[in-house]
Amino acid sequence: MILSVASGKGGTGKTTVATALALSMGQDVQLLDCDVEEPNAHIFIRAEMDRSIRVCTPVPEIDKDKCDFCGKCQEVCAFNAIAVLKEDVLVFRELCHGCGSCSFLCPRGAIREVDKEIGCVEMGTLKIGARDTLRFVHGKLDVGQAMSPPLIRAVKEYQDNTSSVIIDVPPGTSCPAIEAMRGSDFCLLVTEPTPFGLYDLTLAVEALRKLGIPFGVIVNRSGLGDAEVEDYCRKESIPILMRIPFKREIAVAYSEGISIIEAMPEYRAEFRRLFEDIRTG
């Protein structure tokens, strides 16, 4: 089963939930941290990292001896990464998504693709219990790089679909989040009972409905704020699968890089039950 953990906004507790699930399942599990612009699951997992792979994405390079400046490459580029002038072609590498349309459709064969390094994928393991292993993969986008979806796809290339997989999704509902959630069997949306939490939850719900991915909600910091999130979920028939109370002990543990189930072991059974309910439901 592939379970993604997402949120409409940052800071709702998405990584808290994803790491707690991975550490509490009592079986071999794989955790993918696809929040490659700011990965932080490793702070709580503390896996022994033993492999690092540089990741590249293809970008166009123009052979001006062959180019007749016809403008076809500019026409087919959906991301405005190429501008054709009278006697020059400008390539904006930061805007390129590496789709390959320009090189494939160039009538003069004047475009070839070259690799541009964008970051790395790192892998490691952590023993959980006497017999079980948590396999951990995360991506780190290089400083200054604008396109994270290619690195997210690189992380997901190491996804083991024969075991239980948990994906820590980038916050929001833009391209990085969609790329990370794509292909999931179920998505947990972590929110908070505030006006900001509600607004961004509605955006995430709309995105998941368009993707056709089943989902449920976890309300973090329950007891703080108002009841608007609960009312919205009731009105939209969205199941609230868990409520995590607003407690100082949880916040202190998080600030020290300690998982909620390490700080408060009684939650281990709650997260295990949550996963089993999703898997069997």
Image: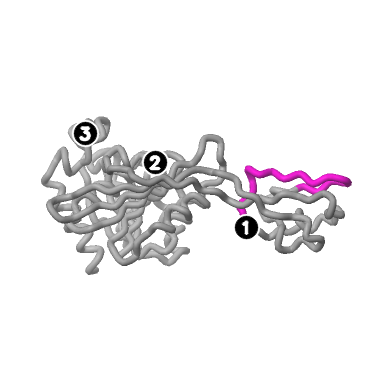
Magenta span includes 93: yes
Eye-nearest disc, 3 or 1: 1
Q: Amino acid at mark 2?
A: Pro
Residue tagged 2: 39
Q: Are marks 2 and 1 in contact (CB under 8 Å)?
A: no
Q: Quadrant of the C terminus?
A: bottom left
Residue tagged 3: 253
Q: Residue 43 at x, y = what percent? A: 30, 37
Residue tagged 1: 99
The local crowd at label 1, few if under 14, some if 14 to 19, many if 20 or more residues have their Cα within 10 Å, is some
As displayed, is residue 252 above or below residue 150? above
Q: Residue 107 at x, y = what percent? A: 80, 63
Q: Are marks 3 and 2 in contact (CB under 8 Å)?
A: no
Q: Amino acid at mark 3?
A: Ala
Q: Secondary structure at mark 3?
A: helix
Q: Secondary structure at mark 1?
A: loop
Residue under the point 24% across and 47% down: 126
Residue under the point 12% across and 52% down: 130
Residue range corresponding to the magenta coloring: 83-99
Magenta part, dominant SS: loop
Q: Amino acid at mark 1?
A: Cys
Which residue of the protein is positioned furthest toward the bottom in this rendering? 280
Q: Quadrant of the N terminus?
A: bottom left
Q: Earlier in the sequence, mark 3 or mark 1?
A: 1
Q: Nearer the viewer, residue 113 or 236?
A: 113
State whether residue 176 appears in this view.
yes
Q: Left of 171 or right of it: where is 221?
A: left
